[in-house]
Amino acid sequence: MLFPLGALLGAAVVVLPAVASSEASPTISAVNYPGGGYYQESHAWSPAAATIAAGGTVALKNEGNVPHGVRWVNGPATPACTGGVPVGTTPGASGTKWSGSCTFATPGTYTFYCTVHGAEMTGTITVNANGTTTSTTQGGPAGTTTTGTAAAPGAPEASGAGAPSGSPLAGSASSAIRLARVQHGGAVRGSVALSQAGGGGRLEVDLLAGRASLAAAPHAPLASAGRLARSSLPAGLVSFKVTLNARASHALRAHRRLALSVRIVIQPVHGQPVTVTRAVLLRP
């Protein structure tokens, strides 16, 4: 009787690491919301971002009946994805009711779109080489990614306008950054509430669209649709307006809509920058 019991215990020891590894892998799902967006629906990756160590794996899935796929538009290397993930550059690389995973060996930031809905569904995966913790926030249907260096657990928070670890945002990203999900006209408008630590810093807002939308050069997966940079920012509420460039304006008139990835970077005088990426659908 002792031998079978020992065999069972040995089998349990073999299984446990696999279970722990599975639980440590984040999962990003394709989700659909009623109202707005394409055909009166909005689509997003939930959560819109994940942070893992080099060599880590992220599970991706689409449990719904709306086709979605994965298109890598930026990153230091191409992730190794299982056959269950429809990866490609065209809407044909998509499907319903699928699941799989991607493994990231090279540190860096990876950005991906849905092959069907473009920049409306923007996701970001940060791969850390040294185990540094970063903060990631999902902002609901709009899809929000916020990245900045976080203090170690239990470490005291610095305070004061010149504190290196002070956040330049007055509150969380969801409350400090206002950016309407659907906008009209030839510009994207929004605002950022800056803390005292953010005063005197720099704001950069980049509008990015898929190269197919702007008929850009094939070698550029993302093309610029507009850009704004401001320095010496005052603490408090800072409004911004980013006008479309000529190519993006032409695409908006031709297609009557333009899906944009809006990347907002707040660089304080001291400390780490904060980067927020949100999806905006622009209509005439």
Image (cartoon, rainbow, N blue to C red):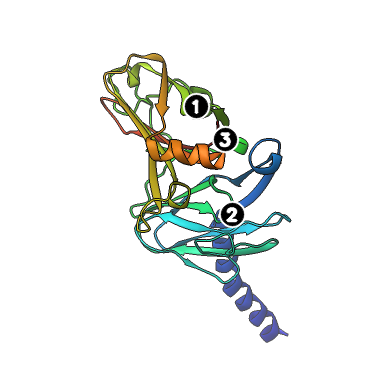
Looking at the image, residue 137 sits to the left or right of residue 153; the answer is right
Looking at the image, residue 135 sits to the left or right of residue 224; the answer is right
Say if mark 2 contacts mark 1, CB within 8 Å.
Answer: no
Disc 2 versus disc 1: nearer the observer: 2
Local packing at callout 2 (Cα closer than 10 Å; few below 14, some 14-19, many 20+) is many
For the residues labelled 2 and 3, the Cα–Cα distance comes to 21 Å
Say if mark 2 contacts mark 3, CB within 8 Å.
Answer: no
Placement of 14 over or under 123, stated as above or below: below
Local packing at callout 1 (Cα closer than 10 Å; few below 14, some 14-19, many 20+) is few
Disc 2 versus disc 3: nearer the observer: 2
Task: Identify the amino acid type marked 1.
Answer: Ser
For the residues labelled 2 and 1, the Cα–Cα distance comes to 31 Å
Residue at which label 2 appears: 116
Quadrant for residue 79, please give it: bottom left
The disc, 1 or 3, on the residue closer to the chain's N-terminal end is 3
Q: Secondary structure at mark 3?
A: loop
Foreground of the two, 25 or 189: 189
The disc, 2 or 3, on the residue closer to the chain's N-terminal end is 2
Placement of 188 over or under 129, stated as above or below: above
Residue at which label 3 appears: 139
The structure residue drawn at horizontal position 73% and vertical position 56%, both measured from the top left corner, is: 65
Per the rendering, the mark at residue 172 is 1
The disc, 2 or 1, on the residue closer to the chain's N-terminal end is 2
Task: Identify the amino acid type marked 2.
Answer: Val
